[in-house]
Amino acid sequence: MAVDCHIHMALDGGYWKDALARHKEAPDEAFIRKTLETYKRLGFTYLRDGGDRWDAGKRASELAPEYGIRYRTPVFPIYRKGHYGSFIGRGFETLDDFRALISEVKVRGGHFIKIMISGLMDFNRYGVLTDEPMPGALIRELTNIAHGEGFSIMAHANGDAAVRGAVLAGIDSVEHGAYLTDETLHMLAESKTVWVPTLVTIGNLIGDTRFPEEATRPLLAYQMAAVRKAADFGALITPGSDAGAYRVFHGQGGLDELALLREALGENADEILARGTAEIEARF
Ligand SMILES: [Zn+2]
């Protein structure tokens, strides 16, 4: 039995524009079924999608029971206009826009809310993020609205400021979490927020020529050490690969993530991850 708490059915591990083009008329059911079959063959029983605005993940959630998989979808991820997320999500400017998107997720049968509250790691430059974090007060308002509608929240968050904002707001899971300092890892450990470190999105770049290893190797080492520290402090951690992201292939990516987490966490890895995964499965 395996779980992957962060995948994107709409993507395929290649270039995102080509992958998304496949679903633009309608979700590509042949691709989705083939992917679900791969997960089933590898023993996956729980998948949590990060969403896409073409309904590939939503269609997958409808088909997944045929494959013995519990599949959770936010329908589409939500980003703040002018910030990271426009390639795959739906944007908001005002809180009323945000409330309208939440209502739409509810009407369309979404299981939770996914929001983007930071940029990405810059894989060309160690230590650099691609966007400023969302202000803490706004993170708190969005969280209160979504929780008020009965939804759990998954947040794409890199860097101390965004992750602290998420923890203080009571967001249910933070995804990626690059460059966290010890103080933030302590805050995470004292909260009920589950960390999904997606190590394989970095690990699978090593040996590829797209990004310089002077940037990717120290980033992976930093993240592996942070995961170990967070676990020592008592944080909730669960495997999620970001499958579909560049060079992270469906199914195999989840297995690769588990291998990296086991390497980072040592002999108690399975026990540590079981705690985090139980929280995710209960809330999402
Ligand atoms: Zn993702």
Image: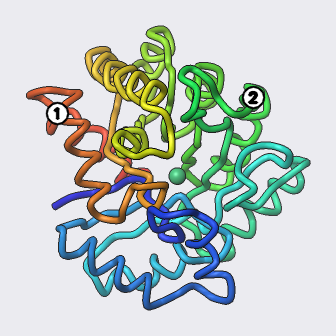
The residue positioned 27% from the left and 60% from the top of the image is: 252
Left or right: 79 as drawn, with respect to 251 = right
Left or right: 16 as drawn, with respect to 284 = right
Q: Is residue 244 above or below residue 63?
A: above
Q: Amino acid at mark 1?
A: Ala
Asked if marks 2 and 1 touch (Cβ < 8 Å), the reply is: no
Q: Amino acid at mark 2?
A: Glu
Query: Among all residues in the image, which is located at the extreme left?
Result: 267
Which residue, given by chain and number where applicable, does mark 2 sit on? 132
Q: Quadrant of residue 142?
A: top right
The residue positioned 79% from the left and 33% from the top of the image is: 138
What kind of element bears circle 2?
loop
Which residue is at the front of the view, 219 or 199? 219
Query: Among all residues in the image, which is located at the extreme front?
Result: 209
Residue density around tag 1, few if under 14, some if 14–19, many if 20 or more, within 10 Å:
some
Q: Is residue 247 above or below residue 223?
A: below
Q: Earlier in the sequence, mark 2 or mark 1?
A: 2
Left or right: 268 as drawn, with respect to 216 = left
Which residue is at the front of the view, 22 or 159? 22
Front: mark 2 or 1: 2
**Image location (x, y in percent) of residue 194:** 42, 36
**Image location (x, y in percent) of residue 190:** 42, 18
Left or right: 89 as drawn, with respect to 177 = right
Which residue, given by chain and number where applicable, does mark 1 sit on? 269
Ligand 1 contact, mark 1 (Cβ < 8 Å): no
Query: Among all residues in the image, which is located at the extreme top?
Result: 183
